[in-house]
Image (cartoon, rainbow, N blue to C red):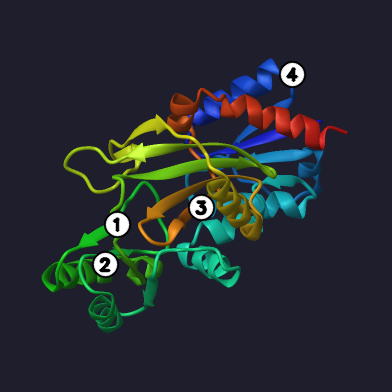
Amino acid sequence: MRAALIVDIIRQEEKLIAKALDEKQVPYDIINVGQEPIPFNKGLGRYDVAIIRPVSMYRALYASAVLEAAGVHTINSVDAINICGDKILTYSRLYKHGIPIPDSIIAMSPDAALKAYEQKGFPLIDKPPIGSWGRLVSLVRDNFEGKTIVEHRELMGNSALKVHIVQEYIQYKGRDIRCIVMGKTLLGCYARNIPPNEWRANIALGGYPSKIDVDSKLEETVLKAVGVVGGEFVSIDILEHPTKGYVVNELNDVPEFKGFMVATNINVAEKLVDYIKETYSK
């Protein structure tokens, strides 16, 4: 078996994956799609598995597409990356299958966004369908803030950033829950606790991890959500609603796992390489 590790920026996670591949004696090449072109060429078929790790959603999506065309199994697949990389597509798939999501309204123009604010009521969340690390996710407390956000988003060049997901503000327990799934197995979950002077729990914004116990309902919700989007190695962010219980906020097709490893003491990179060897070794 030979693997390809597809990257654009090499972070701690990619270094850990490369280390695990070395230690477990899996032959591999690192392909940096931020520097090297990848051709539609059957020669790529020398790889049995490609681990898709670009930070850029579109680089991840297109790299996976080219490799899949050459017969390479990609983790994750084109379809999974496409669904997980767009929050509206994610919510659409989850809602269709009866998996709880935050109450959401999709607005595709400034006028529609202001009407959605009125329908939802303040405070509320407004976020675009693409993006990570909490960027452009806004807590809107009144119509004045909302109008400012709408005006600023209209100035952005990417059309997707002008689309608004208007959601209920779920403020409960001061945390969210991040879980990682590999294949059909839940590796574990941990809490991302909201830091002082912030309302978001992202680790990139100062959220701090802590260990939690996983109950059967959380595990059921996570595995069902990952299954309907076709994810093979994904993280999933869960909110705790005071009346609905667990609701799925988003799924990540190129999961970061530094905070997960701190909270759970599970070596995700080693688990990933073990999974690949057990599942795809010829």
What residue type is disc 4 on?
Answer: Gln
- The answer to the question of whether label 1 and label 2 lie on touching residues, with beta carbons closer than 8 A, is yes
Q: Nearer the viewer, residue 94 or 279?
A: 94
**Residue at image coords 35%, 65%:** 161
Location of residue 257 in the rendering, given as x and y in whole percent from the top left corner? 49, 34
**Which residue is disc 3 drawn over?**
251
Q: Earlier in the sequence, mark 1 or mark 2?
A: 1
Residue annotated with mark 4:
25
Identified by mark 3, the residue type is Leu
Residue 136 is tagged as 1
Placement of the C terminus among the 4 image quadrants: top right
Q: Nearer the viewer, mark 1 or mark 2?
A: 1
Of mark 1 and mark 3, the one earlier in the sequence is: 1
Residue that mark 2 sits on: 153
Query: The residue tagged with tag 1: helix, strand or loop?
Result: loop
**Left or right of residue 17: residue 237:** left
Q: Position of residue 245 (x, y in %)?
A: 44, 56
Q: CA distance from mark 3 to mark 2?
A: 23 Å
What amino acid type is highlighted by mark number 2?
A: Arg
Q: Nearer the viewer, residue 92 or 40?
A: 92
| Residue that protrudes farthest toward the right in the picture | 282
- Residue at 67%, 16% (x, y): give it: 23
Q: CA distance from mark 1 to mark 2?
A: 9 Å
In the image, residue 170 above or below residue 143:
above
